[in-house]
Amino acid sequence: MRPVILVHGLLGTEDAHYAGCRRWWRHSVTEIRLPGHGAGGEVPSHPAAAAIDRLREAIGEQPQPPVVVGLSYLGAAVAFRAAESAPDRVAGVVMSGYSFLVSPDTLNRWLAGFTRMATHQQGSRNHFAELHGEKWEKLLTATFDELSDGCLRLPDVEDLTRVGTPVQLVNGALLQNERNAIGPAAAAGADVAVVAGAGHVVPVDAPRVFAATVEEFAARVDAGRTAFHERRRAAERAADVAAGEAGKAGEAAEAGEAAHV
């Protein structure tokens, strides 16, 4: 079965975000640790760029093109950008806890709110320090700087229409903005799934359903039964029709010329 690579979200780890799924996987799964995350290691100057490079390396180590899964805005963006740069080496991308509709202003408001929460809520500070040590604030700042200055650009609907690999969006049903993201993603060519009872971090809230959804998508990728594949088939059918009509028009023109000889 096709391998799966898991990318956790900002200020998380593979244990924090995917541990609940481990008992449910049937496919071979590789979990990668994003640079700067966890108790060891330093924060790189460009952590998201380093994360994309790390994911590309993991993709290259797989026995066949994997399905890459990215969680939340950092993990999903890293997964998408890595696949975008090498679509022939990635079978598909699953993005969870994500919206392709986030404007720069909205993103800035979210970042500001997240920063206030992380700074002023002692429980959050203790949680992040336990996971990442005292460097967690530096990691947060460096990642937000990349998002703000465009070094890491969040994929939008236009990116989705152009990407050369199947994409599935898996969001929880409990958050309105992530429910609202489903329709536009489907219209732009993504497969979509909404998980009842789950919030932003679907693999934590519904691990069994999440693992099954990813593996079902992988099976449909192999069978050529995704929105991406159907869109390609529709384009090929339209091209065939256009070529046929052009051929008929050419034959008619030749017949008209022959009639005047």
Image: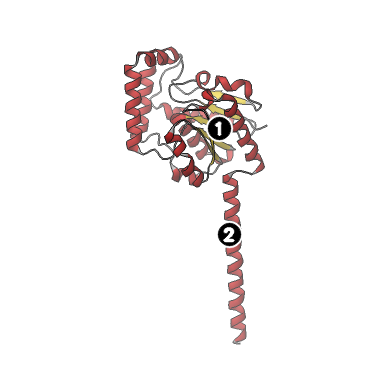
Total residue callouts: 2
Closer-to-camera residue (172/215): 172
Q: Which mark is residue 57?
A: none
Is any atom of residue 63 visible in this view?
A: yes
> Could you tell me which residue is drawn at 59 percent across and 82 percent down?
257
Of the residues shown, which amino acid type is indicated by label 1?
A: Val
Above or below: residue 16 compared with residue 79: above
Above or below: residue 104 compared with residue 209: below
Image coords of residue 205 (percent x, y): 52, 24
> Could you tell me which residue is drawn at 38 percent across and 21 percent down?
139
Of the residues shown, which amino acid type is indicated by label 2?
A: Ala
Q: Quadrant of the C terminus?
A: bottom right
Closer-to-camera residue (45/184): 184
> Could you tell me which residue is drawn at 61 percent across and 71 percent down?
248
The residue where tag 2 is placed is: 239
Q: Quadrant of the N terminus?
A: top right
Image coords of residue 115 (percent x, y): 33, 23
Displayed quadrant of residue 244: bottom right
Q: In the visual, does 226 lie left or right of 149? A: right
The residue where tag 1 is placed is: 68
Find numbered disc 1 in the image and state the secondary structure of the residue it sits on. Answer: strand
For marks 2 and 1, give the CA distance: 31 Å
Closer-to-camera residue (14/37): 14
Q: Earlier in the sequence, mark 2 or mark 1?
A: 1
Find numbered disc 2 in the image and state the secondary structure of the residue it sits on. Answer: helix
Q: Kindly indicate whether the residue at mark 1 contacts the one at mark 2 (C-beta within 8 angstroms).
A: no
Image coords of residue 123 (percent x, y): 38, 13
